Image: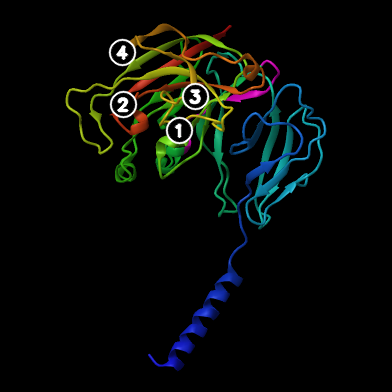
Amino acid sequence: MNIRKMLFFCLMAGFMFSSCIKDEPLNAEADITGITVDGPELIRQPVITNNEVHFYVNGWEDVTHLAPKFTLTEGATIEPASGTERDFTQPQVYTVTSQDGKWKKTYTVSFTSDDVVTSYHFDDIKWYEYKDEWDANAQPQKLFHIFTEKTPNGDTFEWGSGNAGYMIIASGQPAESYPTSQSPDGYKGKCAKLQTVSTGSLGAMMKSPIAAGNLFFGQFKLDIANAAKSTHFGIPFRKVPKELVGYYKYKAGEKFTDKNGKEVAGKKDDFAIYAVFFTTDNGTDYLDGTNSQTSENIVMKAELNDRKETDKWTRFSIPFTKLKPIDKQKLGEGKYSLAIIMSSSKDGATFDGAVGSTLYVDELQLFCE
């Protein structure tokens, strides 16, 4: 190719590239991607979910005159404006509008200093809703259940689950087909149903052929590079846990397989119910699926060891075992976190388990010193 032809093609490529930039549609996303606030000392990094932002602070912090600053998706705007001073003794609502002006998302921003609720009934849920950002006429779709409980001060506590990860391959399945959902047949009222399901051809290709039903204190943030790190376990907790009591039913699936989808002859699936109390004063805001039972930060642990298959509601009571001394000053400063973790397949974090394994849980109660 001679120089003249090379220049021609370069000019054409530059023209086409600039035309693409000029014609690129405005951004349709309306998300809060980051947030900072001056003033109170935070116990842990802010937690941003699909429609909420949680700050964790000590009870003595003044939250009456705070002006959070937001980072948004490209071109989006927020009302009230970023940096507006507000009184956060009550949760405050913000509306994010996409760059193209077609989409709006409402976020509730709250500052939490109280402990979470300690009785869990699984009677109340809210829906995770999804709206197609590229279809102006699309209606929000209710995809899966999120379990909620009311705290003594009227706030809403949300359980975490891996449903958001399964959503990628759910393809319009009903909420009851997700790994974690609500069942009407509880010990009292309704209950949580955790089931191990197949992730189909896409999951098999990614060496994650199953998705175990799980329920935990914390949030789910998808980590494609290491799926076990997607579960962020733990929330700040200011009391010393003593015992976890509840009811369960369990049935193992028929065929136990490994992460390659190969059957493991003679092996039977098992479930998990356990809790860990751990320190967060060294930069560890949460544990995950790789270290939730092995982290050096764990100071107390409770685990249901007497597990069995049963079609009848079975009561359990598991005490917390103290592994390390607890610093009362750090406890008061909110530098400990608690995670209650349940799964329909004990080794689900490494994608070992049996499709069809199902764990029902109801009427949990946490006792503290």
Question: How much space separates mark 1 and mark 2, taking CA atoms?
Answer: 17 Å
Task: Confirm or deny contact between disc 1 and disc 2 (CB under 8 A).
Answer: no
Disc number placed over residue 162 in the picture, else none: 1
Residue occupied by mark 3:
297
Disc number placed over residue 309 in the picture, else none: 4
Q: Nearer the viewer, residue 323 or 270?
A: 323
Considering the numbered disc 2 on the image, is that residue within a helix, a strand or a loop?
Answer: loop
Task: Confirm or deny contact between disc 3 and disc 1 (CB under 8 A).
Answer: no
Q: Position of residue 187 (x, y in %)?
A: 46, 10
Question: How much space separates mark 3 and mark 4, taking CA atoms?
Answer: 32 Å
| Residue type pointed to by label 1 | Gly
Q: Nearer the viewer, residue 272 or 172?
A: 272
Disc number placed over residue 286 in the picture, else none: none
Q: Is residue 330 left or right of residue 206?
A: right
Residue occupied by mark 2:
356
Say which of marks 2 and 4 sits in front. 4
Q: Main secondary structure of the magenta part?
A: loop
Q: Nearer the viewer, residue 39 or 52?
A: 39
Q: Residue at x 52, y 78 (%)?
A: 16
Q: Earlier in the sequence, mark 3 or mark 2?
A: 3
Say which of marks 1 and 2 sits in front. 1
